[in-house]
Image (spheres, rainbow, N blue to C red):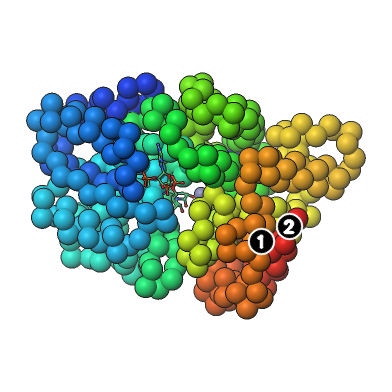
Amino acid sequence: MQNFTFKCPTDITFGKGAEEQVGKKIKAYGGTHVYIVYGGGSVVRSGLLARVERTLTEAGIAFTVRGGVQPNPLVSHAREGVREAIAFKADFILAVGGGSVIDTAKAIAHGVANPKTDIWDFWSGRAKLTKSTPLAVVLTLAAAGSETSDSAVLTNEEMGVKGGINTPFNRPTLAFMNPELTYTVPKKQLVAGISDIMMHTLERYFTKVKEQNRLTDLVAEGLLKDVVASARVAVQDQTNYDAMSEIMWCGSVSHCNFTELGRSKDFSCHKLGHALSAKFNTTHGESLTAVWGSWAKFVYQDDLPRFAHFAEAVWDVPSDFGDDKAKAEEGIRRQVAFFKELGMPTSLGELPSGVLKDTTLHDLADLVTAKGTKTVGNFHPLDWKAVSDIYTMANHEI
Ligand code: NZQ
Ligand code: ZN
């Protein structure tokens, strides 16, 4: 096993009625002025925002509210939030929504604690984040895992780039997770979220690390199998509490780094996906499933035993199915078939942006590799040519 450090400090309240605890717990953590962030209005229509506000009022906490976060959230919107939250003297930020809302709230939390620094400087690496403001999250969509992750992803619309930062300051102080709140998620977002949850573990499963790490592998494989089984129930009945609970908890475990302990991250498909989202506003989960199969086919021969093991452990491919190459290919086929079963795109051509011209694929490869000056991923480090080849493979149905 490789050395590792792991600190996942979020105080999680999970289950029915979790959101009723918001006021009480923020107060216990010292919050007096709460800046609430939400998205396009689903939490207003469902009555969730009003319930959360009531708990703050009952706890004697002052609050102000900012809506309007869009999927693939913009740094410009977060900047406005920073200004408002500072004027309000916010000492706690509260996100009520999915990953986009949470990531915006993370950016606002950083901006409030560092009023002299433009928040994008933290994303671009020009400034180093050394402090933030406490953040609470009421999660409404199981997907990004931002409720426990050390990551936050923003789009800079002026620069045409989407990117994330990883820092311990991104870990929320509090998370409230009631699976019932996810019953109203649109089907397209449900399946995109399920796919993202799987991808967060897949992007940690295929890495260069060769040392044995059985527990981490078993956690990863168990999580993937649980997501598959629960997803099959959830797409039929989105009000199945057990299935929605499993998916919600898998979302947090999948991206809190627990499935990479002693291993590492690859995340090249995320980089390819972020470039698509930056250019076409592609839904995050869709940007991943559109490229994963092509990525896997491009790299799998680097470590056939690993892909063969994945096929057996996650997709129940029989051990006597064939040699490692045959098993590896079958595992990839079954993973892609599952994405299709969910109704997810598994090629670029199936995205709303359609089949792309070669010049566009090259622009995307420029974005991913900073015009060929860096590689992405570690299982098979991808240079400009490799990224461009994978996009080309992914352009048409696989
Ligand atoms: O905005 P509202 O009206 O709330 O509607 C949202 C939005 O339109 C809707 N929704 C959410 N919960 C709902 C609901 N509609 C009805 N009922 C509910 N209970 O769903 C739509 C999508 O929301 P969004 O927050 O964009 O989805 P998701 O949670 O998938 O987040 C995606 C963002 O997170 C980033 C992605 O890149 C993308 O920008 N990621 C963040 C990560 C992190 N911070 O750790 C890791 C991920 O890899 C990912 O990159
Ligand atoms: Zn993701």
Task: Give the answer, above or below, for where 135 lies relative to 110.
Answer: above
Residue at horizontal 31%, vertical 67%? 121
Residue 397's disc number: 2
Q: Which SS class for mark 1?
A: helix
Front-most of residues 177 and 302:
177
Instruction: Indicate the quadrant containing the N terminus: top left, top right, bottom left or bottom right.
Output: top right
Residue 71's disc number: none
Q: Quadrant of residue 317?
A: top right
Left or right side of 200 for 45: left
Q: Residues within 10 Å of mark 2 (few under 14, many from 20)?
A: some
Residue at horizontal 55%, vertical 26%? 237
Q: Residues within 10 Å of mark 1 (few under 14, many from 20)?
A: some
Is any atom of residue 4 visible in this view?
no
Which percent across, then down, holds residue 16? Answer: 37, 21
Left or right side of 247 for 222: right
Is disc 2 in contact with disc 1, using a CB cutoff of under 8 Å? Answer: yes
Amino acid type of the residue that numbered disc 2 sits on in the rendered structure: Glu
Instruction: Indicate the quadrant containing the C terminus: top left, top right, bottom left or bottom right.
Output: bottom right
Residue 349's disc number: 1
Front-most of residues 32 and 56:
56
Front-most of residues 165 and 249:
249
- Sequence-wise, the earlier of marks 2 and 1 is 1
Residue at horizontal 38%, vertical 50%? 100
Which percent across, then down, holds residue 12? Answer: 35, 29
Left or right side of 49 for 223: right
Amino acid type of the residue that numbered disc 1 sits on in the rendered structure: Gly
Which percent across, then down, holds residue 319? Answer: 84, 33
Residue at horizontal 63%, vertical 40%? 342
Which percent across, then down, holds residue 167? Answer: 37, 52
